[in-house]
Image: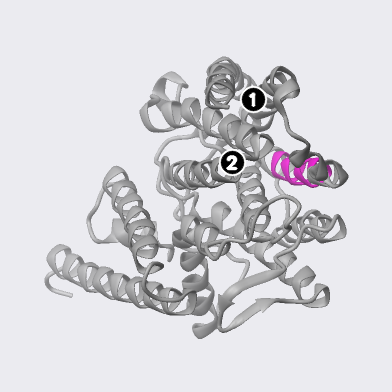
Amino acid sequence: MIIYLLGAFLLSMACGFVFTPIILDFCKRKGLYDIPNERKLHKTAVPRLGGISFMPSMGIAFVVVMLMMNPSISGKDTSISLWSAYFCISLAIIYLTGLVDDLIGLNAKIKFTTQIIAASLMPMAGLCINNLYGLFGIYEIPYWINAPLTVFVMVFIMNAINLIDGIDGLAASLSLMALGGFLIAFIREGLPVYCTLIAGLMGTLIPYLYYNLLGDSKKNRKIFMGDSGSLTLGFILSFLFVKFASYNPKVMEFHMDGLLIPYTLLIVPMLDVIRVILYRLRHHSPLFDADKNHIHHKLMRTGLSQHQTLLFIIALSTSYIFINLLLFKVIGLTSIVLIDIIIYTLANIFINVMIQHQEKRVYPNE
């Protein structure tokens, strides 16, 4: 299976390197740029349609490799065919929503509504978070609870990835790490369909990161993923979260880490959204309004550059993975979640102290 996954990764990456320059030239002709303002960190106009390449690159790689793998796919995977159409419809809804938003702009409430609609198709197809694996002492949960919980989690993750996309490479890097973790997890379960999907998406992020991190905006070779990219990433990551956490004995054996792994892989963007929501509620700010209070904004106020901030958050996410996997051997999921919250709280307190120190250094007389 590994050779097929490598093929999906390389084919998707090749498609991305072909599509991205075409998208850049199209954006230049049509004047489709992300214009700098007081909230944004970039200083020059940058094309914002990088995410357009994600779904076609991934789709081409997935179809080609699955056709090559077809003789070796076991009957174990045939159960997903009942709701695969729902996944495709939901993905199309999210992708088109992001594309329209990038082209003409959409109200935040409209995007939120389409996310709910897309996420709601998953429980309708029978894919739900139906087990909490001991979190707060809870295991199996009934459909009338797990269906709305699934929709909430998926919408939450979609917005978490969308909102963390505030500096170069951040959303793509965190997504690439999470996808790598999901790939290992689904390889363990022997599910080549999901592995191929993941490998294809990982491949398309490589050319994006190349142009996003290393591209020169003056030469029209730098690009942002836009909502078409961040929402697509968010939806697929939320789908993988739910899929791995969903207990279906016909597809996967029961594992006590069924919720720990997806939660840990996406912990940084999820905790960031929770902190920002609490901050907005405490300060009576509109929940849907954009601000500069996300973790990457705060880190840059300490004096770090964009690339230093990126490395800090990647290191934080990596640390969580190692800590949670080590702790899971000795304590339960509930205790791990509480420890994670404490660590994140202490990290933010430290960042706040560093911000105050930086402000005193820059404005010593204020």
Disc 1 residue crowd, few under 14, some 14–19, many 20+, Cα 10 Å: many
Residue 120 shown left or right of residue 201 in the figure: right
**Image position of 106 with respect to 337: above or below:** above
Residue 108 belongs to the span the image colors magenta? no
Please, what secondary structure does the residue beneath circle 2 have? helix
Q: Position of residue 35 (x, y in %)?
A: 52, 40
* Nearer to us in this view, 158 or 65: 65
User: What residue is at 53 percent from the left and 19 percent from the top?
Assistant: 10
**Image position of 315 with respect to 71: above or below:** below
Residue 76 appearing in the image: yes
The residue range painted magenta reads: 88-99
Q: Which mark is residue 128?
A: none
Q: Which mark is residue 226?
A: 2
Locate residue 344: give its quadrant.
bottom left
Which color scheme did the rendering employ for the protein? Answer: one colour
Image quadrant in which the C terminus is located: bottom left
User: What residue is at 50 percent from the left and 30 percent from the top?
Assistant: 208
Q: CA distance from mark 2 to mark 1?
A: 16 Å
| Amino acid type, mark 2 | Gly
Locate residue 103: give its quadrant.
top right
User: What residue is at 65 percent from the left and 34 percent from the top?
Assistant: 192
Main structural element of the magenta stretch: helix, strand or loop? helix
Q: Residue tagged by mark 1? A: 57
Please, what secondary structure does the residue beneath circle 1 have? helix
| Amino acid type, mark 1 | Ser
Residue 49 appearing in the image: no
* Nearer to us in this view, 72 or 301: 72
The first of marks 2 and 1 along the sequence is 1
